[in-house]
Image (cartoon, grey):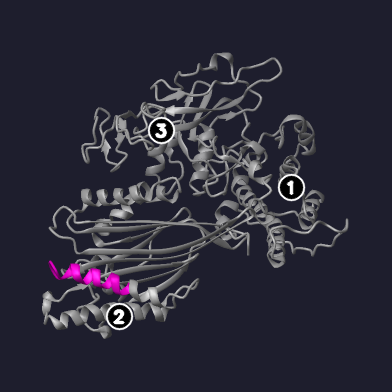
Amino acid sequence: MLICPQCKFENPNSNKFCQSCGTSLTHKVCPECSTDDVPVNALRCHNCGTECGTVFWAIIAKETTGEGLGVQRDEGDMGVEGDEGAISCSSPLSPSSQIALGSYLDSQERYQLLDILPAQTETATITDVGVRVLDCQPYQISPIEAILASQESDLITPSVEASGIPRLAKLYIALQSQDRRGIPPIHDAWQQGDMQVVIIEDRSHWQPLLDLWQEETTSSLKILHWCYEMTQLWALLEPVNCRQSLLDLSNLRLDEDQTLALQRLYVESSNSQPATESSEDAEAQTSAIPEQVLTIQALGRVWQALFRQSQRTQFGSVVQMLGDLELGKIETLAQLRSRLEKISVELEALGTATLPPIKEKNTAVPTIPESDEPEDIISKADDMPTVVLAMQLSSLEDAGRTDVGRQRHHNEDYFGIETKIHKLELPKSRVLQAHGLYILCDGMGGHAGGEIASELAVNTLREYFQEHWIANQLPTEDSIREAVYLANEAIYKLNQQDARSGVGRMGTTLVMLLIQDTQAAVAHVGDSRLYRVTRKRGLEQITVDHEVGQREITRGVEASIAYARPDAYQLTQALGPRDENSINPDVGFFEINEDTLLLLASDGLSDNDLLETHWQSHLEPLLSSGVNLERGVTGLIDLANQHNGHDNITGILIRAKVRPNLES
């Protein structure tokens, strides 16, 4: 089955073009030079040489019988256990398992080797290797992807158990279900004799944590934030015995937003402990970690190794914390998090990004009250604070587009985008202040009616906020309501002047978003919507439609009955047809405290649950800074024309990226 990259339609393997939208299934467009005949199985564009192939990271591991994973054999625990085979750190890869550069890992000739596998030597045996591979069939859905897409309740179903998914793959599947970006998503996996092959996202090119840790411009607050993120990952990895993944410095990476992430998973063995350093320090560091059950002391030693290798000075409170960790005075993650939070508060109170050096050897640190860790760490992880520091805006991008659709002859939708961004960047600080006004209106009243109403509403609102938006301060609810009432009055007066009546009276819906730094406000009238997409919560509809069906639901009527009415989709309020006494705009406020994608949509884009069905393919990828928003909004318009098309289609995308506020 070939999945169309454009519309996600499932095509037979023999198709060369998508039978739904016509997109090529054998060639693609180069993102650099726009050449449109690059074979999908090519690593580089033949025209400009840009690497545009679909590259993954392959883990090849020897499997033997035994308890090498160190995971209890309980079939009910996350579906990870239950296989007879386990990965053993003492079983080397055999010479016959070596694969030549350019050959394929699988019999279907899908995954082509891009790196040379390390060779065995007399002094070192290789038990587990990671290499880059090119996916030569990128539109072919893998069995693992099919499983993940179909699972709604149980992590591993009986049929999946019977298919013999490699045990290492089940760890990725289990952790992926927790929706944690720190863990690389799994793409494919299979058993090949006594070898396990797991295909995951390639993070080998991501920036190593150590590189940024040793930068002089990296503040102590930022380092504290990374330490806190490590405690979050520790809590996630502990139930599946993968804490070792945090103890290899080369495995600690940063994504595009400088958020901590792992390149891959490492499973704890019962008779060995990981080295946190390479080269000449490796032996000393390994011996510093006793061969016993891992505790959070190991995290302290990782932090010490990072400070040592980066030659970065440790400051008073941090020295005290690391000392208390080593002495066992900090015993639980809750205590460690409390200490990190306390230090960050101290830094913010000092108004500087660095702490003063320790003055005395025995500087007193207030005792942190003990608190028990939750028994089920994964299930309780969301109850923990997600950040230590306040967040600030790091970038604000937007794109908008409107389209007449496939059935209408004129476009009654209208939108407006107005932003002001002030950036101050110095060697050791960066401040971004931004405010954005985003307005979308869906007019009604026929040609030269709806078009006038929607444009008049947008311009009235723009003019109001040009005069009344106080610098660096989000408008109040009263101010926002006043603006909406003025827009309503402008259209209402025009209706009265032209003596329009009944269905001839023009009007418009409204959805409006106002952003000031990390604060946001939304106002709406009618059925144009605001959606929010975050990595933690997925897709959320922020506004509630002003229509008869929704009104009946709020009165307690079941949705199936409410929307069975013939007038279920009739608007209960709109701008223009009546005076301000007949409208009551909904106004709400929220904070942007994580990377967020916001979408203003007319009903031509949101009808028939289009966004709810396709958000993972057409919205979620847009959270990444590397994805072009203009292309994203164009893709949404094309999607709506394919599945809806009965109405005008308008969308405004806003991507807000945030980072810890290191200058507070």
x, y percent for residue 545: 29, 69
Give the Cα distance between marks 1 and 2. 59 Å
In the structure shown, which secondary structural element does the residue marked by tag 2 occupy? Answer: helix
Q: Earlier in the sequence, mark 3 or mark 2?
A: 3
The mark tally for this picture is 3
Residue tagged 2 = 486
In the structure shown, which secondary structural element does the residue marked by tag 3 occupy? Answer: loop
Q: Residue at x 33, y 47 (%)?
A: 631
- In the depicted view, which residue is nearer to us: 367 or 481? 481
x, y percent for residue 604: 23, 59
Residue 300 shows which numbered tag?
1
Residue type marked 3: Cys
User: Which residue sits furthest right?
Assistant: 361
Q: Main secondary structure of the magenta part?
A: helix
Residue tagged 3 = 52
x, y percent for residue 237: 60, 45
Q: Residue at x 58, y 26 (%)?
A: 129
